[in-house]
Amino acid sequence: MVELALGIMLGLLGLGAGIGMIAGIGPGIGEGQAVAKACEAIGRQPESKSEVTSTLIMGCAIAETTGLYALIVAILLIFVAPNMFAGIIMNAVK
Amino acid sequence: MSEIKTPDVKSRRFRMTDYALIAMMILPFVVCILLKVLFTPAHEGVHIAGALIYLEIPAPVQPLIISESQVNSWGVIISILGLCLYLTHGLTAKAVCKRQLAAEWIVEKCQKLVDENMGDYFSTWAAFVAAILGLSALSSLSCLVGLFAPTGDVNVTAGWAILVFVLIMHYKFRGGFWNYFSGLFKPIPFFAPINLIGEFSTPVSMAFRHYGNVLSGAVVSSLMAAALGGLSRTLLGWLPGILGDIPFLRIGIPAVLSIYFDVFSGCMQAFIFAMLTMMNVAGAVPWEEWNARKEKKRLRRSAAAG
């Protein structure tokens, strides 16, 4: 019975981590649009390339934040949560 | 005014000091690598773990932990101190040593960055911003020599972010406590909890952004190394003797990833952390209220004086 509970717990944690990383779509779309606009801007004004590039990299790094939150949640679910929940299940069985 | 003496670059004493400073730059990393080698437990296959714990000091609430990230970041701090002392050793008005040009370049760039982004009032902040930039960049780059990057531990970046948060708060309160407190209830009182969360999300997002980038790089790199090891075992396992055991595919390929994840991402995140520090602190000052307060204080003082 405990094995079943642990198995279900591990499976659901993996599933949760995978579903959580769906959040990676958002920053992907956002950064893609930002790069597209930056390319347009450089095409229109080639002399402003260095400024556009530095602003773009800065903006991309900030837009990445939501994706990184999802990543941290996923990493916690995979590496930290199993120990914690296994402890809880073991205490409940006792 | 006393004349600045031109240092004798060839003299024995100057050289010995130079060697000592170079040792001060390199030795912390050597000590950190040595500690890591001594404390790492034996393991096989893919191994993803946080910082090693070197020492646990018993304390009343919970044990005080001295971990790898703390030791490594102190190593980085000592190394940066050595670098600064080395670059400024033998400074003269005429620039006798080549390293003085490097030191001047660094100082000028940092001063320019701060002047452009923070305005005249914060002109003296170049030292703080340069310190954050250098510490963060060198911490991220320290994984190139095989160390655990201190920025890959959320405690380290959270410490920096809390420091920045205290500074932001200090400048926000320049307009008076009541001004800050009533600002939370704008535009309508219903927004107060959201504004409060917004205040605290600044340090959280700064800490998590830096830590998440470095950690994800480390995780992806180690997964890649493990996958390449397995791939070379299946592809090249037929080679005779010990040749079959050597993971040839691991040579060179992970280095390409490392250029992006360790070098580019590490430097980029250091720059972004410094940039956000500058923007948040410079944007926190309520100039109008602060000037009005100063004016009021001055009037009160002059009225009291007569």
Image (cartoon, grey):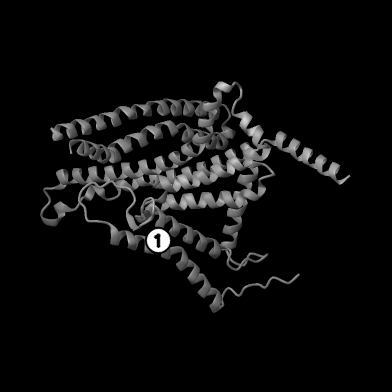
* Chain for disc number 1: B
Against B31, residue B205 (above or below) is: above
Image quarter of the N terminus of chain B: bottom right
Q: Is residue A17 left or right of residue B116?
A: left
State the image coordinates of residue B278 (x, y, percent, origin top left): 58, 42
Q: Quadrant of residue A20?
A: top left
The one of B279 and A49 positioned closer to us in this rendering:
B279
Q: Residue at x 60, y 53 (%)?
A: B127
The one of B154 and B61 positioned closer to us in this rendering:
B61
Label 1 crowd bin: few (<14), some (14–19), many (20+), radius 10 Å: many
Image quarter of the C terminus of chain B: top right
Q: Residue at x 44, y 42 (%)?
A: B210
Q: Residue at x 59, y 21 (%)?
A: B188
State the image coordinates of residue B265 (x, y, percent, origin top left): 43, 43
Q: Is residue B134 left or right of residue B45?
A: right
The one of B49 and A59 positioned closer to us in this rendering:
B49
Residue assigned mark 1: B29
Q: For the residue marked with disc 1, what is the amino acid? A: Phe
Q: The residue tagged with tag 1: helix, strand or loop?
A: helix
Against A92, residue B45 (above or below) is: below
